[in-house]
């Protein structure tokens, strides 16, 4: 029996190799004017003069090649979200983590062997460029899908803003926003539209691939008049799970099977409701209930609207992967507490364990590859890259405490992880063993997990992919505010696995970015001149106290400015009176 299974596996591999292809996309990244919600035309970032950007389709075993020309006026980079990039970390994409960004006017080629199948997406990873439109589905088909279906559709969910990201980011990180209120979108979109339609044929089975490409919004997904079965989560096939609705937070993906109805007498709404709890305020004009339409017949009436605010409880930790993977006792455990507070630059920043992430002067992967034996020393990467150094093939556990009033989706590059625990409150390692472990021989696996407010989640993975991998909140505003750490995985193995293409170095030189040495671009552990971030304010300020302090400072500054303005007005008035008196004397 075992021999037969091995023979079938070898035949499958041979079939995959025989069908493998090099799939090439030529992408000129450009500015485009667009009005996806029909409310406001604005400048967006598109590809080849088009928006939305094209969907990428490849098959397991292919090699994906993306030839990029950067034709916008700022550096850029691309991240293929969810791809392992095994032995290929230099093409993972986040700026100043695995590469220098692509300068304006420059070319760059991403070459990615496809070793997975499932539902993914690709997006800009320099500043917040995907908020401005640089984002799209990346679909990887299996040569022999686990579940059979007749056709498939992709549902790319996204929030949409009428103002460019850089303007909103400056306001968000300003000292005049001490509460850290995130920009609220003007609209929600399905496939970058507000009126998307999907044609169904009675009796057919459809695979719906749902991707949340938002900067902030979380959606609750459900369909009127149809049952759904979840079959995939973040690229991992899972046992069928019937659901009536489920949440999809930023960066997560699901596939569901939907059996079409037996007749074409009615059409039905698809619902993607934005969760108002993600927004600091909900403007009255914001339409939270985003909808598309399943069309059986253009002439058929629409079935009664099944919109609701009551959603089925859903726990992604209970999804069972089709290909089992037993967990192992961790060799290293990293407790991380996510929080927001006003730091000593008087702006509201995000922190893991009181450290806000700040990009180093040298891309962290380059530091790992150019510092020799020091590459295993966390100090060489700088405090504000928040490095977590692990050895090759160790089992690593991260316990994420969410010490914040809001929910956070956390994403790990280069891996899927097992969800091995959940509990409420804040876990303190000094209090004893972690209390929330889930007893499962085959834990749920994915690459992005939601950690609700005042709760914690334990994730675990094997460090079998040498490279530098970002671990961060995938609310884009929170990443820009510093809610990130860096996993330095198997630095002792990296030089024998990873090679930096000369084009990488050319881009660094063009942008004046050092490309070797420690986080400061120096030799050894001399970190003089390194980029440093703000730190927590001294003392024991409470959050309310910090906000009160900041508003007091702002009020004092405004008061001082008012006094100066009035003083100048008085000076001008007195000067005018003196001049008038002098003129009168001269006349007499």
Image: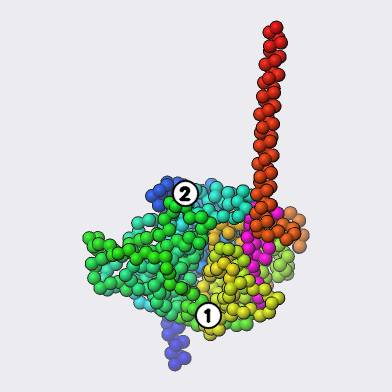
Colour scheme of the picture: rainbow
| Direction from residue 301 to residue 354 in the image, left or right | right
Quarter of the rendering containing residue 305: bottom left
Residue 34: image tag: none
Q: Is residue 18 above or below residue 356?
A: below
All told, the count of numbered labels is: 2
Q: Which mark is residue 443?
A: 1
Tell whether 144 sits left or right of 402.
left
Magenta residues, dominant SS class: strand
Q: Is residue 26 left or right of residue 491?
A: left
Q: Position of residue 181 (x, y in %)?
A: 56, 55
Q: Is residue 496 visible?
A: no
Where is residue 475 shown, x and y percent of the image?
54, 61
The span shown in magenta is: 331-355
Nearer-the-camera pick, 135 or 405: 405
Label 2 belongs to which residue?
162
Q: Give the quarter of the figure containing the N terminus.
A: bottom left
């Amino acid at each position: 029996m075992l021999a037969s299974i091995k023979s079938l596996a070898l035949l499958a591999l041979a079939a995959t190799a025989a069908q493998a292809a090099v799939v090439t996309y030529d992408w000129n990244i450009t500015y485009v004017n667009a009005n996806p919600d029909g409310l406001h035309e604005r400048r967006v970032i598109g590809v080849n003069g088009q928006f939305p950007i094209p969907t990428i389709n490849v098959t397991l075993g292919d090699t994906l090649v993306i030839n990029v020309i950067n034709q916008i006026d700022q550096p850029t980079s691309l991240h293929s979200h969810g791809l392992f990039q095994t032995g290929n970390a230099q093409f993972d994409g986040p700026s100043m983590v695995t590469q220098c960004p692509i300068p304006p006017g420059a070319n760059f080629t991403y070459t990615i062997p496809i070793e997975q199948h499932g539902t993914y997406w690709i997006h800009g990873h320099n500043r917040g460029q995907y908020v401005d439109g640089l984002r799209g589905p990346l679909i990887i088909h299996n040569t022999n899908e686990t579940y059979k279906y007749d056709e498939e559709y992709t549902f790319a969910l996204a929030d949409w803003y009428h103002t460019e990201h850089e303007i909103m980011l400056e306001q968000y990180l300003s000292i005049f926003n001490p509460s850290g209120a995130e920009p609220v979108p003007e609209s929600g979109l399905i496939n970058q539209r507000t009126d998307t339609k999907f044609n169904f044929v009675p009796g057919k089975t459809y695979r719906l691939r749902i991707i949340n490409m938002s900067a902030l919004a979380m959606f609750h997904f459900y369909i009127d008049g149809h049952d759904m079965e979840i079959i995939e989560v973040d690229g991992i096939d899972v046992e069928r799970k019937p659901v009536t609705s489920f949440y999809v937070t930023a960066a997560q993906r699901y596939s569901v099977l939907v059996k079409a109805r037996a007749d074409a007498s009615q059409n039905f709404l698809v619902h993607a409701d934005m969760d108002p709890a993600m927004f600091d305020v909900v403007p009255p004009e914001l339409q939270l209930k985003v909808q598309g339409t399943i069309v059986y017949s253009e002439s058929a009436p629409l079935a009664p609207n099944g919109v609701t605010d009551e959603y089925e409880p859903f726990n992604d930790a209970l999804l069972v992967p089709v290909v089992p993977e037993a967990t192992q006792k961790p060799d290293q455990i990293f407790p991380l507490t996510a929080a927001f507070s006003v730091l000593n630059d008087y702006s509201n920043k995000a922190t893991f364990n009181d450290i806000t992430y700040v990009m180093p002067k040298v891309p962290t992967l380059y530091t790992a590859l150019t510092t020799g034996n020091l590459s295993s020393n966390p100090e060489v990467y700088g405090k504000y890259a928040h490095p977590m150094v692990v050895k090759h093939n160790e089992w690593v556990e991260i316990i994420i405490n969410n010490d914040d009033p809001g929910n956070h989706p956390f994403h790990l590059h280069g891996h899927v992880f097992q969800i091995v625990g959940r509990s409420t409150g804040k876990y303190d390692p000094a209090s004893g063993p972690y209390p929330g472990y889930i007893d499962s021989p085959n834990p749920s696996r994915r690459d992005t997990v939601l950690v609700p407010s005042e709760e914690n989640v334990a994730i675990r993975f094997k460090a079998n992919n040498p490279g530098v991998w970002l671990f961060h909140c995938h609310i884009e505003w929170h990443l820009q505010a510093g809610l990130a750490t860096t996993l330095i995985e198997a630095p002792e193995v990296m030089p024998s696995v990873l090679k930096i293409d000369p084009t990488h170095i050319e881009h660094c030189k063009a942008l004046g970015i050092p490309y070797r040495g420690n986080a400061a671009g120096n030799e050894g552990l001399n970190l003089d001149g390194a980029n440093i971030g703000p730190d927590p304010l001294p003392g024991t300020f409470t959050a309310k106290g910090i906000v009160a302090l900041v508003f007091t400072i702002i009020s004092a500054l405004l008061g001082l400015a008012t006094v100066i303005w009035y003083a100048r007005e008085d000076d001008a008035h007195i000067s005018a009176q003196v001049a008038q008196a002098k003129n009168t004397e001269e006349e007499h």
